[in-house]
Amino acid sequence: MDLSSTPLPAVSDVIAFPELIAAGPELVAGGSGMDRPVRWAHVVAGGDAIGLLDGGELVLTTGAGWPRDERSLGRLAEELAAKDPAAVVFEVGTHFDAAPAPLVAACEQGGIPLIALHREVRFVQLTQRLHQRVLASQHEALAARAEVHAMLTELGLNRSPVDYVIERLADTLDAPVVLADSAGNVVAWAGRGAEPEEILGAWQDPAAGGVGSATGSGSGNETVPVEAQGKRWGHLTALPGPQHAAGRRTVLELGAFALALGRLADADGEQWLRDSSKRMFDALLTGRFRRDAEIAAQLTATGLPVAGRVLAGATLSSVGAFGAHGGLERTLLETALRRAVAPEGRVLIAQDPRAGGGSSEVYPAGRRPGDDDDRAPDLLVLLSFPGGDPRLDPGRGAASGGADTAAPGGPGSDPAAAVPPLAARLARELDMLIPTTTPPEWRAHLGLGVPARSVRGLITSLEQVRAAGRLSPTAAVGRVTVQEAERQALAFLVRGLSASPEVNAFASETLGPLLAHDAGAGPGHSGDLVRVLQAYLRHPTNRSLAAQRARLSRSVFYQRLALIEEVLGVDLADGPTIATLTVALLAHEAGGPAPRPDQGLSRRS
């Protein structure tokens, strides 16, 4: 019988009652069961009364009406032990001079304490004291249960986030508490001062060789399901800790019910996943951890294995009008990416809380933040693949297949550029998911950071690709354009430094006259000199290809280049000039202040 949900007096508590102490108690057998809970007291006279026991009682007896032969006593003792009482108190001297040997043997075998009393005691006094103690415990449990229920009701009315609910449950139980989804990935946890590695050790990714349980089951752990209306969303686990007046399991069950109600109110069913991912990105980007092993344990428990894996940070955003609600656009992007990394890969995705993005100079048809509030937010991504997986292999072997070398699908891309296999997989998944009403100019833009094999490398990869924002694509396939840190090292470096006043001043001084000319009106002001310069700097040794990228005839393109040289006073065939303008243009695309018209490179002599 499960008595763990309500704290009850143990046998060791009962034996300390003054009435028992006065009767000269002696522990004869079953010393290992002194912590067994006692739920009631029952006086047993004669063998027939044993059948009335339910288990967990304190049996009080003098042996009245018991048989005297060994065989009958043995059967009676076995029957009594089979009822699993909490303990047996046997008063000797009236009917037996000592506790019967068969009873001693049966109690010792079953771990049931057998206490012999050598002086007479009034059983009614023991019964009364024990029942008062049990009823007081039950009343305390009811009061504690009502207090926990009221707390969880308030949290529900306040729409408190899941991680705060888990923190309050951990405070209530004075023990670490972990919420995991149905796949065993940790959604939220609270440690009560314990180390994350110790708390989350049981939650590992089985596909990555983990040995933990999806429910966090372990010695001393208490686990309950989070479910409602026939749906099970996960498990709530409390690690070992002190008893609670309402019962540890009762507290967990109340917490699980409150969490289940929250899931029923979650329209798209993604809130747990998004909340847990957001907390991991916050921890990584704000340094909310002390050791690499600590954050690695959290990443692994959340569903992103680290040990022995190839890791990378990435960004995912959209370009162009989607033609539907931004929520659908985000869901489509996330679903396509999850399917693109499956089954061997793992991914965490969260909205980038920082406003901003790339350059609309790269995408004339794109949007800047604020142009359209009904759009999918830019997404931050953490990727984890087994070693040698071609989707994060810089070599990009033949495993990608013919579809991975498809023709470019967006502006600024190079037809000859090799398409990363992950981008090709993403394009295929988008083709299967995207609505037929989506405008043809819509694109998904994937930014890939440098692959790494450590937590520190992963953080660097994420910070780098995030700071770079949206760059000119290195390749495109289907509806996906992609930029890669490994192939755009200079652009990523400049974007990472673009927030400094010195870099902004450099961009302003270098490009000021050109931007002023584009902003002007009248004859000779085509307004496209910056776009032409971008095309030229991407292909400085192939002006025919640059003209094609700028969508101009070669003669018009050459005229524009001559005008750029005149406005800036530079020679576009000069190597240092090309390098200077490339850095300035990258810094300008990062969103620096507009240059002044009187600023520019030194004039040629």
Image (cartoon, grey):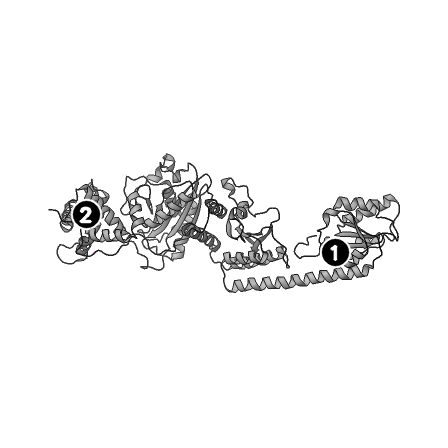
Q: Which mark is residue 14?
A: 1
Kind of element beneath mark 1: helix
* Residue depicted at x 29% and y 40%: 417
Q: Residue furthest top?
A: 398
Marks 1 and 2 in Cβ contact (< 8 Å): no
Kind of element beneath mark 2: loop
Q: Position of residue 523 (x, y in %)?
A: 12, 56
Q: Quadrant of residue 575?
A: top left
Q: Position of residue 398 (x, y in %)?
A: 36, 34
Residue flagged by tag 2: what amino acid is it? Answer: Leu
Question: Can residue 550 be spotted in the picture?
Answer: no
> From what the image shows, is residue 308 above or below residue 268?
above
Q: Which mark is residue 552?
A: 2
Mark 2 neighbour class, 10 Å CA radius: few under 14, some 14 to 19, many 20 or more:
some
Q: Nearer the viewer, residue 116 or 454?
A: 116
> Start and end of the magenta stretch?
593-600
The CA span between labels 1 and 2 is: 96 Å
Mark 1 neighbour class, 10 Å CA radius: few under 14, some 14 to 19, many 20 or more:
many
Q: Position of residue 521 (x, y in %)?
A: 16, 58
* Residue depicted at x 72% and y 48%: 33
Residue flagged by tag 1: what amino acid is it? Answer: Val
